[in-house]
Each structure stands twice: as structure tokens, then as C-alpha cells.
Image: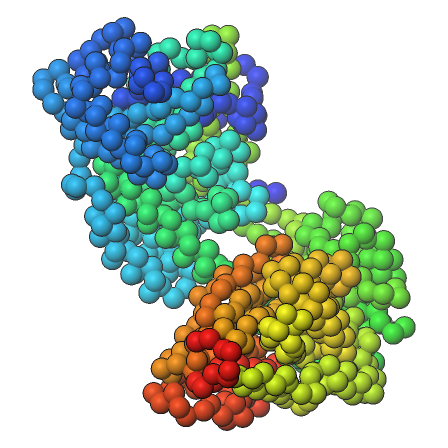
């Protein structure tokens, strides 16, 4: 169903059958065979530096005819001095693309011309060619990192001050426009299906706003997204340019065309040129925003008053800003996701606390009003079938048997649906008011299902997104043409529910894992048993190491709740001492049991080989294969008591502190691997020396992070206890634990302090 608020006109003069723009994926836009004419492209063989390909406009810059250029030494084309500069640049730096541009003076028809030479290598016909792109130099000189940074320093400071994601978007649009001088700058954000939305805009006052408009995924086909991911910045200085063909267009021996993926002058698709022309754009530039190497968004710059040449230095500054902006946007997006996930986790804690009460039915506890699972994940209704009973909340069907049977048939433990009428019409018929669901399958035919109604959405598109199948015949070829209208076009979307946020789905996956634990600890004696298990696994006494002092403390969470913290200390067969602090995710008997398995396994691996890296790799492999629902963090230090030489490694765990003899405490610079159970398989081990009077501090996150204390403040508080002006005054670990304890904390706390004596025993070395 659609409600048009603007016309969606067809392309005038079109003929022949339409070709769907989805086939644009076949267009070889990385090998267009031409370049934009505001610069010259030369492709050289190495090491002789003979020109094998040249853009047809080479005479405009050099005064030399194209026929005299191809096959000639580069020195004959741009001059010996310029070639000497290029050779020196290539000898000095290995990865050319990281050091562009190099400024050279080219012999031109009317004397020397200063140009920016942009270099990269490409493989064509089985051999490597050096691609040299020459653009007349402009902008601030000399080109350097300092100049680039200064150009965007204020923008970076503003981005860092932005408190919300929307503020980051707005700051980005305004700062990029101020830097580049375009008439309009927009920030696009892509959804999981690659549709784009304009989330911020800065423009000339007389221009219409595009803010809030959506653009279909077909506007940027897959191969175009790949190019955006390969190159951060893309400039079209003059949309009305006449392409300068590359001569010869292909490698004579192999017939393979020259790959221009990384060429800054690469000519663009005719369909894209027409797309911009339809919008009235005379020049454009894009800055890619990446998340984990994939296109997450774009900063799109449009100019309407004529061509707009952006100097390489400004483009480099824009690329630098785009890189920083990507990190900032991703960080803000992740912060927002983390906030939702933490809020869901907090509600899960509240729900599970009620669910542990053996005096309440499990189904009723989970479907309660406050707390209840509808507070974990928002929905219109909830169905819980557990312990042989059924409980509902919100708007839920009276007969849930068909729903329960469907959930039990699903292959995955957690199932998500957003358009039930399309994906599962039979179930949709049984649940006429339900458009989407989030379902959890539990053992013994128990289920939890969140339900959502249809969300009727008005989406304002920049033109009719269905008007993408337009083609225009040119001779015997069919060239794909873009949409011919970008006026606001409104679509009313029906039959779908509000999408289930990924962080909520992750929270439900975690809920399921922890709920399995709750189902095991429904009886109070099991909770006591879990506590007994954990305490029994902590060392009865710590090793007595000559020349060293060793102290450790463990404090359970508020209310005596059993967590997954543990500490350990043991002497290895070769005389070294290993100290450990770990934390299994979760609480109760499940976490205690997992902690026991991991603690004993780590002991065995350390005793077997004494190799810290090998022990962590084996521990991670054990957790993956035998404990798939468990995850833990751990930090381990192995110390030679005679020399003070130590190795340290951490998997998902807070980094330890290194204490120096003069009383300073510093956070150890250590690369932390992923947690045990999801590790990388290659944990990094750091070697260090503990000097006489120095030491190591290992701790769990409960010491630094709680409801009342932010992580940064907690770290500062803990390190202050060990950063002492008088190193002869010993640290009271009980005082440290008491100061860091939060009565409302839901996490247990562990602290281990290993200190080397100032007075060394016989045989020890400083």
C-alpha cells in the first residue's frame, strides 16, 4: 500500500524492455577503461619504468602526443628530475598507497608544472604495473601529516565532544562541508539490507532538505559498495566531464583491462553520472564510513553551482576525518547497543532473582509485571510455558498450543521473525494479531515467546524505490539508467513488526543460558551447595615463596550470591610460581561448576608444560568443546622467584598492575585476547621483570566496576591504593577490598597481590 506525496516519473524517451538495476552488479565499474580528465594516468612496467598505458589527455599536461608516450621511458614524458624524485620515493617507502602523494615538477608544454603524483601498484596480465596519477598541485604545502591533522583538528575535537550519535552525525556533516566547500553534505546510514537514510545534513540555505529521506539499496549496487570499502574517498570534480580513455585499453598479451579500483582518477559508471545529473549535481565527493571493514555509511558531498576541484591535501584531510569519524560513529553506535544490552542484562538479573525463589512457579515468575521478561525485551505480549504451567503477559493468545508446537520444531534455540505472514503463513493464521516473534526453546518442551503487533511505518523515499527498472537503448547495447525522479515519495509498510534489536536478541541468548542455570538452582540447598563448591576450590593456603609475599582475597557478591571468580597460586615443577585470577560469566551452581572445571584444567596445563601461551590455548579449546554455554576471563602470571623474570597473559580479563620499587603502580601494557571459550587461538604473552620491592596486582572486574562506580573511576581508585609515595609502607589488602566493596554490587570481588622482597634470599638475582 502506498501514499504518494510526490510524483515518481518514468525516464523520458525510454525504449525497449526494462532492465532491472539488480543486474548492475555485472557492470565492471572497477575497469572503466577511462579516467576523469582533471589529471593524467600512466601505467609503467618495472624496473625499466616504460609507459605501457596512458590516458588520452596526457598531452594536456606534458605537451607530448599520446603516440609518443606509450612505449617511451617515463623520463622522456615527465622529465628526468621528476623520475629521480619518484625513484627515491619508491626506494624509501614500501607500501606506496600509504605515502601518497609525492610532489614532482613535470616538464610541461610551457615549462615545469608542479603536480601531486599518486602511486600504487596493480597486477595486469600476470605482471605488476606501477600506476602513476598526476594531478596539478594545489592546496596547502608542504603536504604532510601535520598539515592534514591541523586541517581536521577542530573537527576531531568537536566529534569527541559530541554526546549522542545524532550529535556526531550533525557535527560530521557541518565539519566536512566547512573543510571541502561543497554546497550540500549528507551523512547516510545503511540498514542491514543496505538501504540508506539521510541522518544528518548541512547545506546552502536555498537548497531543499534531504534529511530523513531513504534511498534503496539498488542505488549502490554490490560492486559499488566493494569499491567504497576499498577506497575511503571518491571525487568527481565535474559530473559533466568527458572521460579520457586509457590507451591501450587492455594488456596486449592477456587482453586483461587495467584495474582502476585504487585509482583516484577512475572514471565512474555512466549510470552514476546520470544519477547525479538527474539530481542536478555538478560535482560530488564521498567519504566511506566503515565498520569492521564493511560499508556502514557514507558522507556524500554535492555541489550544484559548477565543477568543484578538491585538492589532494583536502581529500587526504577528509579521508583522515572519515577514518576518525568511522571510529567515533562505530563507538557511539556500540555504546548505544551496549546501553540497551546492559539494561536488558540488568532486567534479566532482576527476573532471574525472582525465578530462583522456589516458592513461586517458574512460569509465573518469568511472566510477572515487575520484574518480568517484557522489561528485558519490549513486546506487546509474552507467553511462558515452564514447569508444566502456562503464564502470559500483555496481549497474548488464549490458546498457545500451536505457538508452542511451532517453537519446539525450530532448529535453533532462539528464533526471530519480523514478518510472520510472509515467513510462516500457517502460524500467522493461528495468530492473526501477531506480526513478529522472538522465541526461546528450553529443555523438556518449555518455551518463552515475545510477541509484537504490526508496525505501520511511513517511509519517505527519495523517489519511488520501485522505479529502478529503467533502461535506455543505445545502438545494440542496453545501458542501465537510474531513477528519473528524486522527489519525496511515501510508502506505507504493512505486515511487519518493529525489528528485534540485535542487542536484545543477544540478551535473550544469554537469558536462555542463564535460565538453564536457574532451572538447576531452584532449590535453596543447591545455592548453598554452589557456594560450598566455590569456596572449596579456592586454595586452603598460598605457597610460601622465599623472597616473595603473596596475598589474596575473595568477597562474594551482595547477599552471598555465588559468582564465577576464582584465584589460584601454585608452584610449577621447574620452580617457577603461577598466580591466577579468573571470572566465569554467570552466577550460581552453573558458574561455580564451570569455574571448578576451568581452574583444575588450567592447573593441569600449567603443571604439564609450564608454557603460559600453550596453557591458555588448551584451556580455550577445552571450553569450546566441552563447555559451549560457558565463557570466562582469566589473567595468569608465571614468575621465576630467583630472577624476577615473569610472563603475563590475559583472556578477556582486566590487565594487571605492575608495581615498581619506588612505589609507582602502572597498568601493564598488555594485548588482551578474547575470553576463554571464544578465544582467538593466539593469546599474546608479555615478558617483564619484577624488581626487588616491586610486584604484580591481579584482580577481577568486581573490584573496579559496580552499580555506583564507573569503570574508569574504579580503575583510578584501585591503582591509587598501590601508587604510594612511600614504598616501604605495605599495602593492606583488606583495606583495599573494603574500600572497593559496593553493597549493591551483583558481582563478586577477587584481589591477588604478589610482591618481591627488597632483601633477596641467597641465590636470587635482582
Q: Residue at x 69, y 49 (%)?
A: 419
Q: Quadrant of the N terminus?
A: top right
- 570 or 479: nearer the eye? 570
Q: State whether residue 712 is above or below residue 235.
A: below
Residue located farthest toward the front when viewing the structure as drawn: 763
Q: Whole-percent x and y of residue 643?
A: 49, 73
Q: Whole-percent x and y of residue 237?
A: 28, 30
Q: State whether residue 474 is above or below residue 555.
A: above
| Corner quadrant of residue 625 | bottom right
Residue located farthest toward the top when viewing the structure as drawn: 67
| Corner quadrant of residue 607 | bottom right
Q: Whole-percent x and y of residue 575?
A: 62, 73
- 527 or 28: nearer the eye? 527
Q: Whole-percent x and y of residue 80?
A: 18, 20
Q: Residue at x 85, y 65 (%)?
A: 443
Q: Residue at x 49, y 92 (%)?
A: 732
In the rendered image, is residue 128 in sight? Answer: yes
In the rendered image, is residue 461 in sight? Answer: no
| Corner quadrant of residue 273 | top left
381 relative to 293 in the view: left or right: right
Residue located farthest toward the left when viewing the structure as drawn: 111
Q: State whether residue 216 is above or below residue 572.
A: above
Q: Quadrant of the C terminus?
A: bottom left
59 relative to 714 in the view: left or right: left
121 relative to 242 in the view: left or right: right
Display coloring: rainbow
197 relative to 101 in the view: left or right: right
Q: Residue at x 38, y 83 (%)?
A: 663
Amino acid at each position: 500500500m502506498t501514499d504518494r506525496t510526490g510524483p515518481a516519473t518514468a525516464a523520458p524517451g525510454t525504449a525497449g524492455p526494462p532492465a532491472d538495476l539488480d543486474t548492475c552488479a555485472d557492470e565492471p565499474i572497477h575497469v572503466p577503461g577511462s579516467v576523469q580528465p582533471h589529471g593524467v594516468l600512466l601505467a609503467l612496467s618495472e624496473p625499466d619504468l616504460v609507459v605501457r598505458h596512458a590516458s588520452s589527455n596526457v598531452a594536456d599536461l606534458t605537451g607530448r602526443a599520446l603516440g609518443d608516450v606509450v612505449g617511451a621511458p617515463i623520463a622522456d614524458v615527465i622529465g628526468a628530475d621528476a623520475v629521480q624524485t619518484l625513484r627515491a620515493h619508491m626506494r624509501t617507502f614500501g607500501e606506496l598507497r600509504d605515502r601518497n602523494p609525492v610532489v614532482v615538477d613535470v616538464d610541461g608544454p610551457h615549462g615545469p608544472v608542479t603536480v601531486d603524483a599518486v602511486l600504487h601498484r596493480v597486477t595486469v596480465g600476470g605482471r605488476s604495473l606501477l600506476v602513476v596519477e598526476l594531478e596539478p598541485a594545489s592546496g596547502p604545502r608542504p603536504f604532510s601529516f601535520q598539515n592534514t591533522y591541523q586541517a581536521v583538528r577542530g573537527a576531531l575535537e568537536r566529534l569527541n565532544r559530541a554526546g549522542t550519535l545524532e550529535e556526531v552525525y550533525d557535527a560530521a556533516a557541518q565539519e566536512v562541508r566547512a573543510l571541502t566547500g561543497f554546497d550540500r553534505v549528507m551523512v547516510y546510514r545503511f540498514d542491514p539490507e543496505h538501504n540508506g537514510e539521510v541522518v544528518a545534513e548541512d547545506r546552502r540555505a536555498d537548497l531543499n532538505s534531504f534529511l530523513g529521506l531513504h534511498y534503496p539499496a539498488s542505488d549502490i549496487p554490490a560492486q559499488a559498495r566493494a569499491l567504497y570499502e576499498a577506497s575511503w574517498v571518491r571525487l568527481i570534480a565535474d559530473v559533466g566531464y568527458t572521460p579520457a580513455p586509457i590507451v591501450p585499453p587492455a594488456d596486449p598479451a592477456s587482453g586483461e583491462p587495467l584495474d582502476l579500483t585504487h585509482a583516484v582518477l577512475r572514471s565512474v559508471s555512466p549510470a552514476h553520472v546520470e544519477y547525479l545529473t538527474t539530481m542536478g549535481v555538478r560535482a560530488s565527493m564521498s567519504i566511506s564510513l566503515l565498520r569492521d571493514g564493511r560499508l556502514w555509511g557514507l558522507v556524500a558531498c554535492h555541489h550544484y553551482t559548477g565543477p568543484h576541484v578538491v585538492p589532494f591535501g583536502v581529500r587526504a584531510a577528509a579521508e583522515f576525518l572519515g577514518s576518525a569519524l568511522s571510529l567515533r560513529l562505530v563507538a557511539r553506535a556500540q555504546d548505544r547497543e551496549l546501553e540497551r544490552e546492559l539494561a536488558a542484562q540488568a532486567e534479566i538479573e532482576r527476573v532471574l532473582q525472582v525465578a530462583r525463589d522456589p516458592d513461586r512457579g517458574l512460569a509465573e515468575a518469568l511472566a510477572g509485571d515487575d520484574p518480568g521478561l517484557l522489561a528485558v525485551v519490549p513486546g506487546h505480549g509474552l507467553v511462558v510455558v515452564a514447569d508444566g504451567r502456562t503464564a502470559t503477559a500483555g496481549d497474548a493468545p488464549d490458546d498457545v498450543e500451536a505457538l508452542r508446537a511451532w517453537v519446539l520444531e525450530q532448529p535453533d534455540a532462539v528464533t526471530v521473525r519480523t514478518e510472520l505472514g510472509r515467513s510462516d503463513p500457517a502460524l500467522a493464521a493461528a495468530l492473526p494479531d501477531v506480526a513478529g516473534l522472538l522465541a526461546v526453546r528450553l529443555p523438556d518442551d518449555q518455551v518463552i515467546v515475545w510477541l509484537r503487533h504490526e508496525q505501520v511505518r511511513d517511509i519517505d523515499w527519495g523517489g519511488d524505490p520501485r522505479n529502478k527498472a529503467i533502461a535506455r537503448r543505445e545502438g545494440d547495447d542496453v545501458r542501465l539508467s537510474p531513477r528519473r525522479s528524486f522527489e519525496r515519495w511515501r510508502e506505507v509498510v504493512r505486515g511487519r513488526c518493529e525489528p528485534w534489536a540485535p542487542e536484545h536478541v543477544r540478551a535473550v541468548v544469554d537469558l536462555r543460558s542463564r535460565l538453564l542455570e536457574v532451572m538447576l538452582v531452584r532449590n535453596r540447598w543447591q545455592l548453598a551447595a554452589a557456594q560450598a563448591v566455590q569456596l572449596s576450590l579456592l586454595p586452603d593456603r598460598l605457597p610460601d615463596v622465599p623472597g616473595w609475599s603473596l596475598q589474596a582475597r575473595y568477597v562474594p557478591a551482595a547477599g552471598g550470591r555465588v559468582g564465577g571468580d576464582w584465584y589460584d597460586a601454585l608452584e610449577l615443577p621447574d620452580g617457577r610460581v603461577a598466580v591466577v585470577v579468573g571470572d566465569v560469566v554467570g552466577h550460581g551452581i552453573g558458574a561455580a561448576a564451570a569455574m571448578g572445571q576451568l581452574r583444575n584444567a588450567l592447573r593441569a596445563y600449567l603443571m604439564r608444560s609450564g608454557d603460559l601461551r600453550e596453557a591458555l590455548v588448551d584451556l580455550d579449546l577445552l571450553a569450546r568443546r566441552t563447555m559451549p554455554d560457558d565463557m570466562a576471563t582469566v589473567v595468569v602470571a608465571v614468575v621465576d622467584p630467583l630472577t624476577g623474570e615473569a610472563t603475563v597473559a590475559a583472556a578477556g580479563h582486566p590487565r594487571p598492575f605492575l608495581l615498581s620499587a619506588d612505589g609507582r603502580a602502572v597498568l601493564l601494557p598488555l594485548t588482551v585476547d578474547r575470553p576463554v571459550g571464544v578465544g582467538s587461538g593466539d593469546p599474546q604473552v608479555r615478558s617483564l621483570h619484577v624488581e626487588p620491592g616491586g610486584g604484580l596486582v591481579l584482580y577481577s572486574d568486581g573490584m573496579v566496576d559496580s552499580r555506583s562506580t564507573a569503570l574508569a573511576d574504579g580503575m583510578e581508585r584501585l591503582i591509587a591504593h598501590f601508587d604510594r609515595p612511600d614504598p616501604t609502607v605495605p599495602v593492606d589488602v583488606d583495606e583495599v577490598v573494603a574500600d572497593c566493596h559496593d553493597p549493591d554490587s551483583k558481582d563478586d570481588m577477587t584481589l591477588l597481590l604478589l610482591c618481591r622482597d627488597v632483601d633477596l634470599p641467597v641465590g636470587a638475582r635482582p
